[in-house]
Amino acid sequence: MAASLESLRKVRDGGPPMATLTAYDYPTARLLDEAGVDLILVGDSLGMVVLGYEDTTHVTLAEMRHHTRAARRGVKRAILVGDLPYKTYETPKQAVDSANQLMEDGADAIKLEGGREIEAQVRALIADGIPVIGHLGMLPQSILEEGRYKKKGKSEDEAARLLDDARLLDQLGVKAMVLESMFKRVAREITAAVSVPTIGIGAGNGCDGQILVTHDLIGAFPWFCPPFAIPKVYVAESISQAVHAYVDEVRANHD
């Protein structure tokens, strides 16, 4: 294990907020690790920004295992978390079997989406000794059921359900939880109500840390960038310029 998961507690004990990013390959994971990122997620977002799927529901466990192994080779210090992909944790037994495979590939913990509806799965994972990161709010794997990506917690009922789910995950023993695309007030309320770190993405700055898809941070996927992500650089533009220059050079120097 690269870093102790207990180091997550430092955030709740007055330590600095967690800076978290995604990685799906060796060089990216190594660069993030060497730059001081606290937690690296091998997210099923790779389905969209690496594999070209329309959403994350097409990602397979075999693909997640492949990319987890690649990222593991580049990480020496940060906590490495692997995503359980769509339809790989429908029962407690399946959840444990799937998670153990990612753990074998080098994940320090696994992440899965949902609250009370996956209580049995979370209980089984933790009972098996598998560290769990929760994920509440907008759940990308639910896109087929919901039809669109939607910010969560607008109504009082929805906010109350999110808070209830967060408290449950906390009681079950998750190590941290991602709060995605929810109203800031709800994310702040959840952060104040639970004992474990919260990691926000499109949920305001009231969480204990933040996570972004690295492609969004560096402008490497120009065809779509979520509104809450502001690229620090534009890698895709630089690549395009370099390739155009190379093509022109090759053609100009041809005998």
Image (spheres, rainbow, N blue to C red):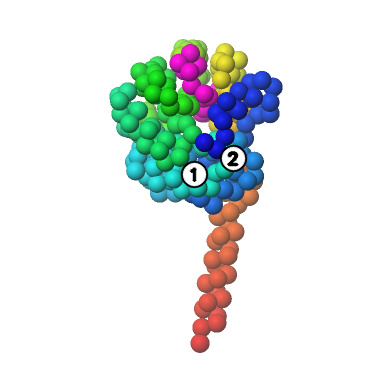
- Reply yes or no: does residue 124 show up in magenta: no
The residue drawn where x is 32% and y is 23% is 92
Considering only vertical position in the picture, is 37 above or below 93?
Answer: below
How many numbered marks does the figure carry? Answer: 2
Of the pair 157 and 43, the residue shown nearer to us: 43
**What amino acid is labelled 1 in the image?**
Arg
Answer with mark 1 or mark 2, whichever residue precedes in sequence: 1
> Is residue 255 among the parts visible in the rendering?
yes
Task: Give the crowd class for mark 2: few <14, some 14-19, many >=20 residues within 10 Å.
Answer: some
Residue 32 in the image: x percent, y percent? 59, 45
**What amino acid is labelled 2 in the image?**
Arg
- Mark 1, residue position: 72
Q: For the magenta stretch, what is the residue range?
A: 169-183
The residue drawn where x is 58% and y is 63% is 241
Considering only vertical position in the picture, is 51 above or below 40?
Answer: below
Of the pair 3 and 159, the residue shown nearer to us: 3
- Reply yes or no: does residue 173 show up in magenta: yes
The residue drawn where x is 49% and y is 34% is 108
* Residue 77: numbered disc: 2
Residue 141 in the image: x percent, y percent? 39, 32
